[in-house]
Amino acid sequence: VFAFLLHHLLQQQQGQATPQYTRGVFQAWLAWIRYVPVRPRVIAESPLLPATVNTLVQAATTTTTTANSSSLPDVLETAADSVVEILRMYPSHGPPDNAVL
């Protein structure tokens, strides 16, 4: 599932998808993290984690002037929700297998 989502997220980064499409990828990632028991190491090793954080960093360091900029806040909100959910589900004070933080 993570490879599938990453593939679709990379399409957006290559300009082949709309922000609504990217939001859908982040919503699926968020739902998977929230409702499926995924081992922390899988989350930590998934390229989706840095891709999610990079989306937030890029948005904070660039300005958007495209026609789809009105949907950018939705993408950012969903990416931020994903990071918050990871922090909630995998706290840093957890067992040693907790490789996310």
Image (cartoon, helix red, strand yellow):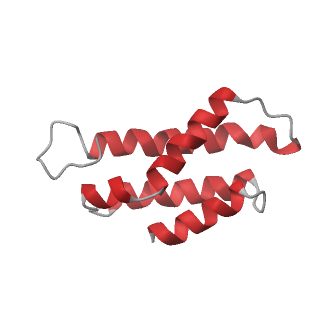
Question: Is 3 on the left or on the right of 68, as rendered?
Answer: left
Quadrant of the drawing holding the N terminus: bottom left
Q: How many marks?
A: 0
Q: Residue furthest left?
A: 95
At x 16% / y 53%, what residue is drawn?
97
At x 61% / y 58%, what residue is drawn?
24
At x 28% / y 46%, what residue is drawn?
89
At x 79% / y 39%, what residue is drawn?
69
- Please provide percent x and percent y for residue 96: 12, 48
State whether residue 33 is above or below residue 67. below
- Please provide percent x and percent y for residue 36: 32, 64
Question: Is 63 on the left or on the right of 96, as rendered?
Answer: right
Name which quarter of the figure residue 20 lies in: bottom right
- Please provide percent x and percent y for residue 87: 32, 39
Quadrant of the drawing holding the C terminus: top left
Question: Is 49 on the left or on the right of 62, as rendered?
Answer: left
Name which quarter of the figure residue 38 lies in: bottom left
- Please provide percent x and percent y for residue 40: 26, 55
Question: Is 34 on the left or on the right of 56, as rendered?
Answer: left
